[in-house]
Image: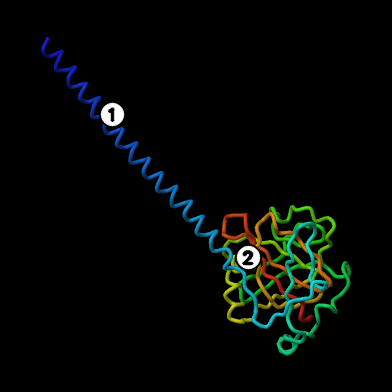
Amino acid sequence: MEIGLDYMQIRTQAQYYGLRWAGIGMLITGIVLVIVGLAYYGNLFWLRSTVDDYAAKRGDVVQLPSRDAPQAPGNGSIVSALALPPGTYDESAGRLGFTPLAPTDAHDLGTLPEAQRLIVPELRINVKMSHADVTGTSILSSNKAGEQENADVVQANPGERGALWFFGEAGQGANTFGGLQDAPGLLDDDEDILMFVDNGSSVYLYAATHTDVFRSDELHLSGSDRSTIHLTVPVPNGLFDHFLVLSGELVGVK
């Protein structure tokens, strides 16, 4: 009889310690999950709090009159209301073997081939276009911004009078647009950011003017009476609620 009671007592103690350690394990797991959750959402908050830092412009850009600033459809924002003073890159374009070309002297829409390659040396971008055609726009990958209702906006090809839009991924490497996040710092330092767009028969040279940041529901593709370019990437990396747009204008052709 005593042996039976001893066995029952040992079993009860084992259950007690088992439940105790199981409870401690669950408590530790819960604390770890809370810490991970706080770190995750804290990191998201910090990342989103820095998106406004991506807005920058060259020191010599000028504000376009409202009648000349390209308007986005619906309630979209003005994406390219800044421009370079006339002749800013004439000398630089000549040194690179390009014929200077003003943004207002570009070809008419629909008269030139689509882009085949985009190179931005300062941002380590060298992309061969694998594009989807959205209302005439060459884009690198379909995303939320590219799916907007923009059927009434005809986008330009390289060298045409209009807005040329490219959407890229925010990864690492020359075939992505991750380097766009360095553009605001370069613009703040008045460094040149030159964009070379090859359509297979000619290379068109664009010079960066400014960057903007838009919430995904505010970004609409805009048209233009000038020849402009807009490189777009989601920020922060991995999220699609804000987009960084690097804008520039046509300055030469070769």
Seen in the picture, residue 27 relative to 233 is either above or below; the reply is above
Seen in the picture, residue 147 relative to 104 is either above or below; the reply is above
Disc 2 marks which amino acid? Phe
Give percent across and percent down for residue 8: 19, 17
Q: Residue at x 67, y 66 (%)?
A: 245
Give percent across and percent down for residue 138: 76, 62
Tell how many labels: 2
Q: Pointer 1: residues within 10 angstroms few (<14), some, or many (20+)?
A: few
Residue 200 seen from this side? no
**Element on which disc 2 rests:** loop
- For residue 79, which quarter of the picture? bottom right
Do callouts 2 and 1 mark residues in contact (Cβ within 8 Å)? no
The furthest residue to the top: 1
Left or right for 10, reference 249: left
Left or right for 141, reference 237: right
Q: Residue at x 50, y 59 (%)?
A: 46
Picture quarter with the C terminus: bottom right
Q: Residue at x 70, y 80 (%)?
A: 61
Q: CA distance from mark 2 to mark 1?
A: 53 Å
- For residue 205, which quarter of the picture? bottom right
Give percent across and percent down for residue 18: 26, 29
Disc 1 marks which amino acid? Leu
Q: Pointer 2: residues within 10 angstroms few (<14), some, or many (20+)?
A: many
Of callouts 2 and 1, which one flags the residue occurring earlier in the amino acid sequence?
1
**Element on which disc 1 rests:** helix
Seen in the picture, residue 206 relative to 113 is either above or below; the reply is below
Give percent across and percent down for residue 110: 88, 67
Mark 2 — residue? 177
Residue 79 seen from this side? yes
Mark 1 — residue? 19
Left or right for 173, reference 130: left
